[in-house]
Image (cartoon, rainbow, N blue to C red):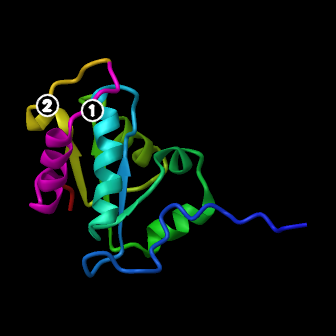
Amino acid sequence: MVAEKGCECGDTSTLAAGRRRLVFPCAGTSNVGQISNTAALQLGDEGYGVPTCIALLGSGDVALKRRIEEADEVVIIDGCSAVCGAKIAASQGVNAARHLVITDLGIEKAYTREIDAEQVERVVSAIWEGKGRWVL
């Protein structure tokens, strides 16, 4: 029997851009939720941080909470003003260093999963440029 491997969401064993940084997208079902998820994955590919599952955080997973404590920075990308990602993090006692809301960048929320690359790039660039609300 093969041993089941645990979830590796939030694995900060490697540094991203010189920091142990976790990126939580809201991953909602609207276009901006899908943009948040795609942007988080792209940020991971670019070495900015580790894309991490907001659902696992919401479940109260002990191993993920330990990885959050070890992280240098937590970033939340929410799609809209409902700020579900930030609310989930707060419910688990997690304080994000930075919080970006995609609709604040002028991208309108639509109830479709269709997204375009330019919108994703706008979010990715905003994160790299340090935009969003810094929480200190």
Q: Is residue 90 left or right of residue 55?
A: left
Specify the amino acid type for callout 1: Val
Residue assigned mark 2 = 107
Q: Which residues are magenta?
A: 112-133
Q: Are marks 1 and 2 in contact (CB under 8 Å)?
A: yes
Look at 14% across and 41% down and name the residue there: 118
The C terminus sits in image quarter: bottom left
Task: From this view, report whether residue 29 is shown above or below residue 73.
Answer: above
Please, what secondary structure does the residue beneath circle 2 have? Answer: loop
Work out whether residue 110 can be spotted: yes
Q: For the view shown, which residue lies furthest in the right direction?
A: 1
Task: From this view, report whether residue 59 is shown above or below residue 33.
Answer: below
Depth check: 134 or 25 in front? 25
Look at 41% across and 56% down and name the residue there: 94
| Mark number, residue 43 | none
Q: Position of residue 119 (x, y in %)?
A: 16, 39
Q: For the view shown, which residue lies furthest in the front direction?
A: 117
Residue assigned mark 1 = 32
Rounded to the nearest whole Å, what is the CA distance between mark 1 and mark 2? 8 Å
- Give the quarter of the image for residue 19: bottom left
Depth check: 126 or 112 in front? 112
Task: From this view, report whether residue 8 is shown above or below residue 99.
Answer: below
Task: From this view, report whether residue 25 is shown above or below residue 112.
Answer: below
Is residue 113 located in the magenta-colored stretch of the structure? yes
Specify the amino acid type for callout 2: Ile
Look at 9% across and 61% down and name the residue there: 129
Q: Is residue 37 left or right of residue 54?
A: left
Q: For the view shown, which residue lies furthest in the top direction?
A: 111
Please, what secondary structure does the residue beneath circle 1 have? Answer: helix
Q: Position of residue 11 (x, y in %)?
A: 49, 70
The N terminus sits in image quarter: bottom right
Q: Is residue 89 left or right of residue 105?
A: right
